[in-house]
Amino acid sequence: MTAERVNPPDLSPPAGFSHAVVATGSRVVFLAGQTALDGDGKVTGDTLPEQFTRALTNLLTALRAAGGTPADLTRVTVYATDVAAYREHAGELGRVWRDLAGRDYPAMAVVEVVRLWDEEAMVELDGFAVLP
């Protein structure tokens, strides 16, 4: 897969995301929403950073099982039950992202939601990837 990150100079500089990603490849992977569920189906983590770490780990586990890598991600949507808390922890969440997924940022959005399927969940991530 080739992925070109496009960040036009007329838009504000992106921090932790790309404005657009142009991907060429032969397989598209649609990744289901992942929360901080452990292998037994229980939400883990008492803080947003802990839950974000587990949710991203789960998303990347699904991606790797489909044959992809973090660099293949082209789009990720983050659903948060408290965007103010997400912004408050943005620096730490960015470090988690870089540690687990690297610096090839996909196109991203953060959306506040009233609640997620699992009532204890504070964050959910879903995404798309294009594989070679």
Image: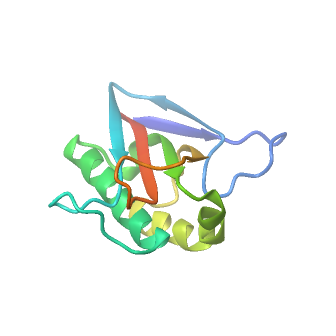
In this orientation, which residue lies closer to the viewer: 67 or 119? Answer: 119
In x, y percent, where is residue 64?
A: 25, 49
In this orientation, which residue lies closer to the viewer: 76 or 120? Answer: 120
Q: Residue at x 33, y 49 (%)?
A: 69
Q: Residue at x 51, y 48 (%)?
A: 79
In x, y percent, where is residue 106?
A: 53, 45
Q: Is residue 109 above or below residue 83?
A: above
Q: How many numbered markers are drawn? A: 0
Q: Residue at x 36, y 58 (%)?
A: 55
In x, y percent, where is residue 33?
A: 37, 43
Q: Residue at x 38, y 56 (%)?
A: 119
Q: Looking at the image, can residue 132 be seen?
A: no
In this orientation, which residue lies closer to the viewer: 74 or 77? Answer: 77
The single residue placed furthest to the right in the displayed view is 10
Q: Is residue 82 above or below residue 47?
A: above
Q: Looking at the image, can residue 70 be seen?
A: yes
In x, y percent, where is residue 114?
A: 54, 48
Q: Is residue 31 above or below residue 125?
A: above
Q: Is residue 42 above or below residue 9?
A: below
